[in-house]
């Protein structure tokens, strides 16, 4: 197999970053199009630069973060972490003991790997559900996690949200909401309340997903729980440092939902054109996507026989999009365990610079390119790793 381990995924990511590096050096950043929806940014002000220090910076920016974070997420207290996954790990380490249990509810399986991996790390048990009729908590359940929006932007209904929170809170079990992109998708597109306003104890979001902040985790929640998690985060170096906090503060100040709403409208136009040729294309709230299984079906429609797994085919398609069309998607640059679904997010800043015809041609052209090389292992390996 060409791609069957975390090490392979890491090498593919390294190759993608090398390609991006060479493209920027050969031309400039403007010829590259990050359509992942999580490119983020670092929108600090000139006067912030002299304060990007370990202690002085933290003193200033953490105070501002409390104000902006509560506006965005609600809750009583805010905590900044170096990644959303770090916040999930710190929460499980702080609130769950070995041999206790984490129960996870999400709109579509499987979970983001950070949740079961964190649970396994402390030798606790883990169960996940995506059916409300099957959901249950046990005598050893010490934390319930809800995913508001999956890696492929499947969004949990408000009804399910409220029901899971009610069941958990009735047994005095704290609820942590993994709202990485959902803190914006759910509230802006689906008009759902913030997680804290629905009764959750904790919520964490990614400040680079559908907003222009740095890659980091922004957590809000009950003050006593935040203090426990903060203590654990500092013990293991999971907390955000002052430069990251400064970027979060400015991104929260600048956040405007208008770009998300415009993307929602634009994706409908592009989708209607693509669906004529690509039967497996699916809409997302702010764009469209092709799952690995959908890609396999598209290849069948083209009468293409090949030895690749769905994940391998999706990763090769992502590398073709990057190499030949300068389009960055998650399967090309994602960390090990990231979703292999090819997703085009029109809320990305770079999408505003792209004509819709270019996006359509890139998607269709990349699929045809994949068709011509899919049975050549040497060429596929070169695309993934060279």
Image (cartoon, helix red, strand yellow):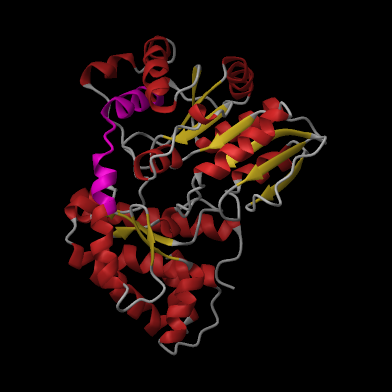
Q: Nearer the viewer, residue 3 or 228?
A: 228
**Residue 80, image x, y percentages:** 48, 24
**Residue 70, image x, y percentages:** 42, 21
Q: Nearer the viewer, residue 297 or 234?
A: 297
Q: Which residues are magenta?
A: 244-264
Which part of the image, by quadrant, shows the N terminus?
bottom right
Q: Nearer the viewer, residue 307 or 21?
A: 307
Q: Is residue 312 left or right of residue 110?
A: left
**Residue 44, image x, y percentages:** 27, 25
65 vs 257: above or below: above
Residue at position x 45%, y 52% in the image: 153
Q: Where on the picture, by quarter, is residue 55? A: top left
Q: Is 146 within the magenta?
A: no
Residue 3 in sight: yes
347 vs 142: above or below: below
Q: Where on the picture, by quarter, is residue 122? A: top right
Residue 24 in sight: no
Q: Is residue 275 left or right of residue 162?
A: left
Residue at position x 63%, y 45% in the image: 105
Q: Where on the picture, by quarter, is residue 3? A: bottom right
**Residue 28, image x, y percentages:** 19, 50
């Amino acid at each position: 197999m060409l791609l069957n381990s975390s090490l392979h995924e890491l090498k593919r990511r390294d190759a993608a970053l090398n390609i991006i590096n060479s493209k920027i050096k050969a031309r400039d950043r403007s010829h590259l199009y990050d359509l992942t929806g999580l490119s983020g940014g670092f929108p600090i002000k000139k006067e912030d630069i002299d304060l990007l220090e370990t202690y002085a910076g933290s003193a200033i920016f953490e105070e501002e973060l409390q104000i902006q974070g509560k506006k965005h997420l609600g809750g009583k207290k805010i905590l900044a972490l170096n990644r959303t996954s770090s916040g999930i790990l710190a929460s499980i380490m702080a609130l769950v003991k070995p041999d206790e249990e984490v129960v996870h509810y999400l709109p579509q399986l499987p979970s983001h790997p950070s949740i079961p991996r964190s649970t396994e790390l402390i030798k606790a048990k883990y169960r996940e559900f995506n059916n409300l009729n099957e959901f249950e908590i046990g005598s050893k359940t010490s934390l319930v996690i809800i995913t508001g929006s999956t890696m492929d932007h499947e969004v949990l209904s408000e009804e399910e949200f409220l029901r899971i929170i009610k069941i958990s809170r009735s047994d005095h079990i704290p609820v942590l909401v993994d709202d990485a992109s959902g803190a914006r998708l759910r509230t802006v597109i689906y008009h759902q309340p913030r997680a804290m306003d629905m009764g959750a104890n904790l919520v964490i979001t990614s400040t680079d997903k559908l907003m222009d902040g740095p890659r980091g985790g922004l957590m809000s929640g009950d003050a006593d729980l935040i203090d426990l998690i903060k203590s654990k985060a500092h013990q293991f170096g999971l907390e955000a440092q002052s430069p990251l906090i400064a970027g979060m503060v400015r991104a929260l100040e600048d956040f405007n939902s208008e770009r998300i709403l415009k993307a929602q409208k634009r994706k409908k136009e592009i989708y209607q054109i693509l669906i004529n040729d690509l039967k497996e294309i699916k809409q997302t709230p702010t764009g469209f996507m092709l799952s690995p299984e959908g890609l396999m079906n598209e290849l069948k429609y083209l009468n293409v026989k090949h030895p690749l797994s769905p994940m391998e085919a999706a990763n090769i398609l992502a590398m073709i999009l990057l190499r030949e069309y300068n389009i960055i998607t998650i399967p090309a640059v994602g960390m090990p365990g990231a979703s292999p679904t090819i997703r085009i997010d029109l809320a990305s800043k770079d999408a505003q610079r792209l004509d819709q015809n270019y996006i359509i041609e890139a998607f269709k052209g990349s699929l045809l390119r994949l068709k011509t090389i899919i049975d050549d292992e040497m060429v596929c390996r070169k695309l993934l790793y060279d």
